[in-house]
Amino acid sequence: MSYTTDLGLYIDGSWRTGEGRDCHNVINPATGETLAALPLATAVDLDEALAATAQGFAHWRTVDVNARAAILRKVADHIRERAEVIAVLLTTEQGKPLAEARTEVLSCAAQFDYFAEEAKRSYGRVLVRPTGQRALVLKQPVGPVAAFSPWNFPVNLMCKKMAAALAAGCSIIAKPPEETPASTSAIMQCVIDGGVPGNVAQLVYGVPDMVSRHLIASPIIRKVSFTGSVPVGKHLLKLAAERVKRTTMELGGHAPVLIFDDCDLEKAITLSATTKFRNAGQVCISPTRFYVQESVYDRFVAGFAELTKKVQVGNGLDASTVMGPLANERRPSAIAALVDDATSKGAKLLTGGSRGDQGFFFAPTVLSDVPMSAKVMDDEPFGPVALMRPFKTFDEAVAQANRLPFGLAAYAFTENARQANLVADALDTGMVGLNSFVISMPDAPFGGVKESGFGSEGGPEGLDSYYVTKAVHQY
Ligand code: NAD
């Protein structure tokens, strides 16, 4: 196994390494060992990236959409060719099992392919006018984008923003997370090798608050895209509001799962217990609050706990590992505090609840009969913790599902088609999964309502967020 130690910033067509910059230590979350030192951008670096992105946009917006698409498809090809190497980097620095890392890397290629083609179908409109007159609605790229993405899906979430922005004709400065720079830099190399000019796509790492303040304050940046926590999203929204900038905010959730007594219970148990521990639960759409109809509650809880006990926890590079460590040292203590609070208030700990001896491990955890007073019923654990509560009626279940200020994803299991339609209509979230947890794919809008954010990534809606409209009236 090899890990890249030669890390840098990609600004205006060249990689910049140490050279006196402050550094961030990149840690292997499975062992706690330091992997590499990552140079952090200075204000001078950011100013140079801003000047370059303005020039890059002036050029890229004029490139024919078919030529842009051809370049983006080459990027996708490079990602597929290098998927195995990038997946190993991702697992080493983020912790997820190698099979999940491979899937994530390949999802990046799928996004470049999808947006390359979808941009060709971004039509404007011709309005009805008297003979000889014209009124056109044109879609034009919004301008240079500043994109901030987190450490749970480091390459997928960076590519969601980058592929759509580039397809629409925008230039982009991406700031992926400092925790996982080798995999995001390897993807950046695919972008470069695919032919995207060095001032059109750039990559910086830094002190997050310093970088976001600097970039968002610049008049050159016309759009801000952020994926991460609700508090940071609110902070960036305020910065963007001061200069009235376009934003897309994909923030946290606390996804409810409604298990109705007419569902295929074995299927619901198996899918729930496998999906919950994917990426160690560090997924904004992770199923977390399980509301189970009374008559099947005991069977669901027992079956879920049984499968959870069998989840093989270990280093993501080991073939037998089903769940790796958490991604950084902040997470185990945050989760332990939530679990301790819940058990002290009466929740039953059916399995898990403890931290590992080394690295940032936390055991797959199931809590049943969790009281509403437990903090974890309100605060997203963002880790391998499943919460179980019984319900009696449809209305009660929907009220519980919708009671939080978040509205990203929700799920329901029922074999009754009418009930499925009613629950899909009633759930106050941006996405609903019925009898499945698979809700993220390139051609579908991904995003939330309420404090989970606004705007979509994915689908034509995701592309649209990188365009402005211009109405042209000719008399
Ligand atoms: P955090 O709130 O400190 O950071 C969340 C993300 O935002 C990180 O990637 C971080 O680098 C970035 N960030 C922080 N401050 C920033 C700033 N001023 N400008 C730009 N980017 C900034 O939390 P954390 O400890 O990294 O993660 C914990 C919480 O974040 C979780 O509980 C979860 O709710 C949320 N989260 C959500 C997602 C998601 O996919 N929606 C992803 C990661 C984390």
Image (spheres, rainbow, N blue to C red):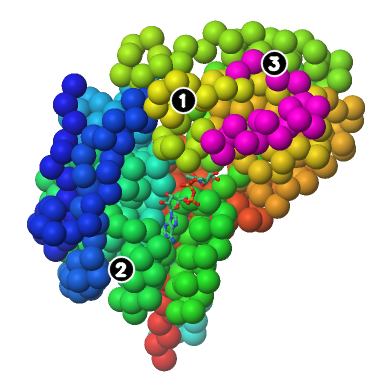
Q: Is residue 415 above or below residue 52?
A: above
- How crowded is the residue under tag 2: few (<14 C-alpha within 10 Å), some, or many (20+)? many
The residue that label 1 is drawn on is 361
The residue nearer to you, when weighing 55 against 284, is 284
Q: Quadrant of residue 465?
A: bottom left
**The residue under label 2 is which amino acid type?**
Pro
Q: Secondary structure at mark 1?
A: loop
Q: Secondary structure at mark 3?
A: strand
Between circles 2 and 1, the one closer to the viewer is: 1
Q: Quadrant of residue 42?
A: bottom left
**The residue under label 1 is which amino acid type?**
Phe
Q: Residue 18 in magenta?
A: no
Residue stretch rendered in magenta on the structure: 333-352
Q: Position of residue 93 (x, y in %)?
A: 31, 33
Say whether residue 349 is left or right of residue 185: right
**The residue under label 3 is which amino acid type?**
Leu
Q: Position of residue 421 (x, y in %)?
A: 74, 35
Q: Position of residue 356 (x, y in %)?
A: 48, 21
Write the residue at 50% across / 37% down: 331
Q: Is residue 178 above or below residue 435?
A: below
* Real-space CA distance between mark 2 and mark 1, rounded to the nearest whole angstrom: 39 Å
- Mark number, residue 144: 2
Q: Secondary structure at mark 2?
A: loop
Nearer the N terminus, badge 1 or badge 3?
A: 3
Between circles 2 and 3, the one closer to the viewer is: 3
Secondary structure mostly taken by the magenta-highlighted segment of the chain: helix
- Mark number, residue 350: 3
Q: Quadrant of the C terminus?
A: bottom left
* Real-space CA distance between mark 1 and mark 3, rounded to the nearest whole angstrom: 18 Å
